[in-house]
Amino acid sequence: MSAAPIRAARQPPVIAHLTDSDFDAIGREFDAIRADVVARLGRRDADYIRNVIRVQRWLEVAGRGSLLLAGRRPMLVAGTAMLTLSKILENMEIGHNVMHGQYDWMNDPTVCSRGWEWDCVSTAASWKHAHNFQHHTFTNVIGKDRDLGYSAMRVDAEQPWHPIYLLQPLYGIGIALVFEWGIAIYDMELDAARRPNNPHDSGAEVVAFVRKAGRQVLKDFVLWPALSGRAAKHAAAANLIANLARNAWLHTIVFMGHIPDGAQTFSEEQTAEETRGQWYVRQLVGSCNLDGTRLFHILSGSLSYQIEHHLFPDIPSCRYPEIAPRVHAVCRRYGLPYNSGRLGRQYRSVARKILRYSLP
C-alpha cells in the first residue's frame, strides 16, 4: 500500500524525518517483536493472570467480610481499603486486559474476552466496541478517536471550541469521581441515535446498561450492606468510597495515556490509507508511559506501559516490562521519542492542557 496520502499531509515534526522505507522497516521490527513474544506465551502468563484474579477475589472476600462488622471503626477502615484495592485490580489489571483478548489463547472460558463481564456499570459489549475497536483503531485521530477528551473535554488545539469548555477544569473533577458512569454513557454513543442510517443500536445498549447498572447498585448499596445489619449505612458508605476511589484512580491513569506534553495527534487526512508501519508509529508517538514500581504498574492495569499496550494490545500485560526496552531501542534507531515520565510530571502537563484548551 502506498504511503503517499500520509506523506502528502502535514506530519507531526517528530516523525517528519521518516521515509517510506523507514515506516516499513519499523513495521517489520514491531511485527518481529510481537511474533517472538506470542511464540513464548505459556504457563508463566497463565499463572500470572490466575494469581492476580486469586488475589483480587481474596481482597474482595476479606473486604466484604470486614464490612459485615462495619460498626467497628477498624473493620470499616480495613474493609473499605481492601474493597477499593479489589475493585481497582478487577477493573484494570484483570477486566481491561482480559477483554482485550490477552488471554484468549489459553482457551479457558473463565478468562475469555467473549465471556468476561466486569464489576462496574458499563457493559462489556459497549466498552469493547468503543475502546478496543474505535479507540485502538483511531488512536489520537482528531474527530475519530472519541477517547481524546471523551467527547466532554477539549485537550487539543485542533478540537473545535465551545463555551461549555470554559467549565472543564471544574466539571473535570466531577467526571473523575463518577468515571464509571461517564464511561458507560459515553460508550453507548447516544448522540448517534439521531444520525440517519445509523447502524448503532443505542436502544438495546441503553436497556443492557440499565440492567447492568441496576444490578451493580443493588449489589453494592442494598444487598451487601443489608448483611451488616445495624451497620448497613456504614457498609453502604464504604462501598461508595471504594467506588469513588476506584473511579478517581482509573480516571487519573487513563488521562495520562494520550494527553501529556509530547503526545502527538493526527488528522484524518494524515492517516488515510495508512500502512502497518505508519499505524505502529502513530500508536507510538500518540501514547505516553508512566514510570513506577512493579506494584504501581499492576495497580495501573499496566496502562503505565501505554506505548507497549497500544503497539500490542492483545499481548498479556505481564510481558510489557520485557517488551519496553526493545521498543525503546527501535525508537533510538529511528530517532523517535519514547514519552515516559513520573505520574506527577505527566499529571501536571495534562492539567495545563485542560486549563489552556478550556479557552478559545
Image (spheres, rainbow, N blue to C red):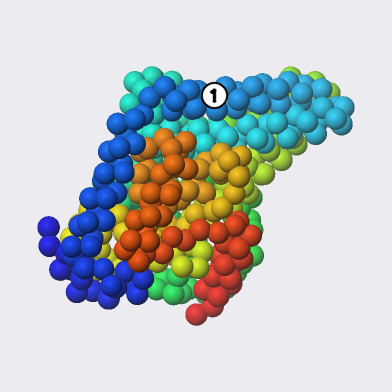
Provide residue 278's location: percent of width, then percent of height.
25, 59
Point 60% across, 56% down: residue: 343
Image quarter (top left, top right, bottom left or bottom right) of the N terminus: bottom left
Q: Quadrant of residue 126?
A: top left
Residue found farthest to the bottom: 360
Quick one: 339 or 115, which is closer to the camera?
339
Quick one: 268 or 4, which is closer to the camera?
4
Provide residue 88's location: percent of width, then percent of height.
60, 38
Point 51% across, 58% down: residue: 340
Residue type for callout 1: Asn
Question: Is residue 256 positioned above or below 236 on the image?
Answer: below
> Quick check: 287 left or right of 17?
right
- Mark 1: secondary structure: helix
Residue found farthest to the left: 1
Residue 208 makes an appearance in the image: no
Q: Circle 1 sits on which residue?
A: 51
